[in-house]
Image (tube, helix red, strand yellow):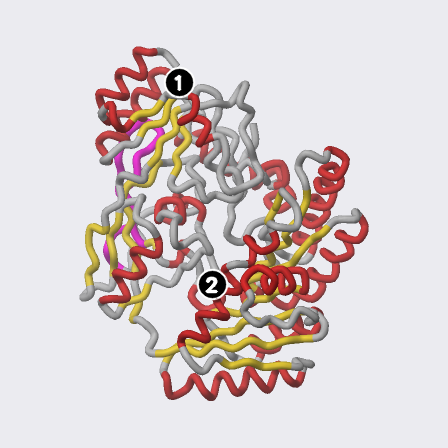
Amino acid sequence: MRPETIQRLSEIVGKDNIYTALEDLYCYTYDASFVKADLNTDLAGVAVYPGSTEEIARIIKIANQEKIPIVPRGAGTNVSGGSVSLGNCIILVLKRMNKILEIDRKNLIAVVEPGVITAQLQGEAEKMGLFYPPDPASQAFSTMGGNVAECAGGPRGVKYGVTRDYVIGLEVVLPSGEVINTGGRTMKNVTGYDMTKLFTGSEGTLCVITKIIVKLIPLPEAKNTMMAVFPEIAQACETVSEIIAAGLVPCALELLDNIYIKNIEEYAKVGLPIDAGAVLLIEVDGDSEILGKQIRKIEQICKGLGAVQIRIASTQMEAEELWRARRSAFAAVSRLRPTIIGEDATVPRSSIPDAVNRIQAIAAKYDLIIAILGHAGDGNLHATILTDETNVEEMARVEKAINEIFIVTVELGGSLSGEHGIGRAKSKFITLQTGEAGLAVQRQIKQALDPHNLLNPGVMFGA
């Protein structure tokens, strides 16, 4: 990147908030996905840490003048390759903009900057008896801006939905450098197109998010957690559908297969039965007077479909121990192979048994280890491929397996992504779901807002 450009950017953000050294720029060649930038061609030209909306607007205007690509980035927890550097780009890191600007109890809203850590907002809201439900697994370190850009989900999605269900207003900087506000502080707002929803989940391709207004809800009075153990994974999958069909909506309904169970127990030692075919981790919340009744109904359904062990947490500490098992899942299986590819294909809940069967058949066909973990309550299955990216022959089989998993997902009426986004990792598969005409419409939106293709080029739509 030209020294003159770097000097202009430095004048905007200050010399302490700009990085050009190789060892600094290397940090942006990867994120939490398996996508890696090519160090020979894709090293960023500069990383800048703006501190305000005004600074971001000025940076983007410079990028427009000089036709420099911009990659917005938060904490780098993206798992679809959406925050990885491109050759000579500007990495726009939003972590300095990390203030909770307001928590409004009367209107049940919060206003935050994009660099606020998700768990920080949740903790501050809970101190006031309020609740921000979206709970990605990375909530302890992922940022709100990244959550909005990816439309992040999590275990509580089965009852409470995902990030888009809580975002009611945004301040964004467009690819032109103009600043606009969408939505607002009201629960009802049908003025014009719903730009808030358009920008939520746009993966940094249409705007840079600089302020977020989210709705909050009252903090549930109580919650109960239970674990149900099944000899076969098919029984656990059927149980998921039966629980929902019975009119019961847990706040979390998680599925772990035997590969995950064995590795979590070896890694975290939380008392999981290593010979089980599958485990369901179930949590209900709400009025304390009805939780016991809900848990008993769920217990009956689990036993009726073959559960051989039911463990109901009697204390908050015991419940937290069960959730510690779930949160350690990816770390536990990462010990098996050096590369983890965690897909998040999502199917209708009634199709979970079929989807699991077909994923297991694909694993056998290509002689791969594919562990299955899922937010099963909303059909979001994490087919986790454990492999070694340095093994060229095996990675060829992995690519074929991924292709078949996506084909199966769409055949079952599902989605390529439930919460991770498309990023660069899945861009070549997007037409499986959208079709060519659907992709063309999205490209037209991108072209209208970003005619020079400067914001996150290659994400979602490919090169």
Provide residue 422's location: percent of width, then percent of height.
54, 42
* Dot 1: element: loop
Establish if 463 lies above or below 1.
Answer: below
- Residue at the image point whose x is 66% and y is 50% from the top: 336
Q: Is residue 459 visible?
A: yes
Residue 461 shown left or right of residue 448 in the figure: right
User: Disc 1 residue type?
Assistant: Lys
Provide residue 132's location: percent of width, then percent of height.
33, 62
Q: Residues within 10 Å of mark 1 (few under 14, many from 20)?
A: some
Front one among 187 and 388: 388
Where is mark 1, residue-wise? 67
Where is mark 2, residue-wise? 157
Quadrant in the picture for residue 44 = top left
As drawn, which residue projects farthest toward the right? 365
Provide residue 50's location: percent of width, then percent of height.
27, 32
Q: Which residues are magenta?
A: 168-186
Front one among 179 and 401: 401
Front one among 359 and 10: 10
Q: Is residue 182 visible?
A: no
Q: In the rendered view of the protein, which quadrant contains the N terminus?
A: top left
Residue 180 shown left or right of residue 195 in the figure: left
- Residue at the image point whose x is 66% and y is 56% from the top: 371
- Residue at the image point whose x is 30% and y is 35% from the top: 173
